[in-house]
Image (cartoon, rainbow, N blue to C red):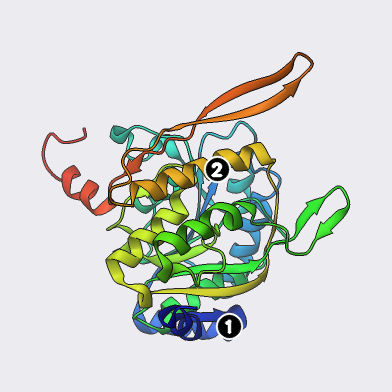
Amino acid sequence: MRPDVRRWLHHRTFTAETWQAPELLAAKRTRGSTVSVVLPALDEERTVGAIVATIREALVEHCPLVDEVVVVDSGSGDRTAEVAAAAGARVVHVESVLPGQGSRPGKGEALWKSLHATSGELLVFVDADLVDFDPRFVVGLLGPLLTDPTVGYVKALYDRPLTTTDGIVPSGGGRVTELVARPLLNAFWPELAGFVQPLSGEYAGRRELLEQVPFVSGYGVELGLLVDLVALAGLDALAQVDLGTRQHTHQADAALGRMAGQILQTALARWPGAGRPESELLQFLRTADGLEGVSWDVGVVERPPMRAVRAADRRPGTWA
């Protein structure tokens, strides 16, 4: 293991149990900080309501560590928006935010637009498909940010049980992480090799940093943020927190292949000299007539740093 990675693991890896909500509330008030929790959501009516209700009960009403809970709906075809609103979230539809910028498909677009739709100095991002959500996820991610001003971005790490036809495999999740993201980071950004879950959907950061980096529109957003933030702020500004176990829905291998394609696109775009990668991913289905090739566009769109968007928006006649 590289000495810098070993040192970072010892210095910047924490456990969620290190902090309790009341002590972080005191730190938040001392610093005058504000906190926004954002859930990007697409067709998550089954789980989003319970997550929102849990956050509101534990961290808004009982211990006001969180100032706003915002669900950014990416055009759900189910009752995601209604369920989230009924549970107490402020629901924002992605098309309504910065309409002059248009709208792109993908999770990263919802996260990028959430910077414009929220007001917190600290932002916590939580996937909307989690099962048995625990409010310590939010507490753990906020811990380093509220107790150490040199930390600017915090990633979650956890065990990911994989549900199969034979039952639950305790740590079988994270297939794209192990097959694509980790090899890429180890090969091209080895200083980031210490991140246990580089693609985790739960993370938190300071607005000051997040508004200075681009957001990839699709599934490459997590890898892109890691690479861009370490370049901007340095490795010691990044940390990770062990949240225990995370349970969520799992996708089929074909869907994971498309996700991997977007992650690869994101990585190659950040590696000088790699050139512009091909954006088509060909996958195969077996049908009654034999094999059928299906092409997918896994190209990603870079959204510019929000700070640049705000500056341009203040200029007359721009992005009307």
Q: How many marks?
A: 2
Residue 169 horizontal/vertical position (percent) = 80, 60
Residue 19 figure quarter:
bottom right
Q: Nearer the viewer, residue 79 or 137?
A: 137
Q: Nearer the viewer, residue 151 or 263?
A: 263
Say whether residue 312 is left or right of residue 237: left
Under tag 1, what secondary structure? Answer: loop
Instruction: Indicate the amino acid at tag 1.
Output: Gln
Q: Are the two marked residues, 1 and 2, in contact with CB atoms closer than 8 angstroms?
A: no
Cα separation between marks 1 and 2: 35 Å
Residue 208 horizontal/vertical position (percent) = 29, 65
Question: Which quadrant is home to the C terminus?
Answer: top left
Query: What residue lies at 59% left-to-right and 40% top-to-bottom?
Result: 257
Residue 241 figure quarter:
bottom right
Taking the image as drawn, is residue 113 in sight? no
Q: Is residue 199 above or below residue 218?
A: below
Query: What residue lies at 55% left-to-right and 68% top-to-bottom?
Result: 156
Query: What residue lies at 28% left-to-right and 33% top-to-bottom?
Result: 100
Q: Residue furthest left?
A: 316
Number of the label disc, if any, that sits on residue 20: 1
Number of the label disc, if any, that sits on residue 259: 2
Under tag 2, what secondary structure? Answer: helix
Residue 50 horizontal/vertical position (percent) = 68, 55
Query: What residue lies at 51% left-to-right and 41% top-to-bottom?
Result: 261
Q: Residue furthest right?
A: 166
Q: Nearer the viewer, residue 259 or 6?
A: 6
Instruction: Indicate the amino acid at tag 2.
Output: Met
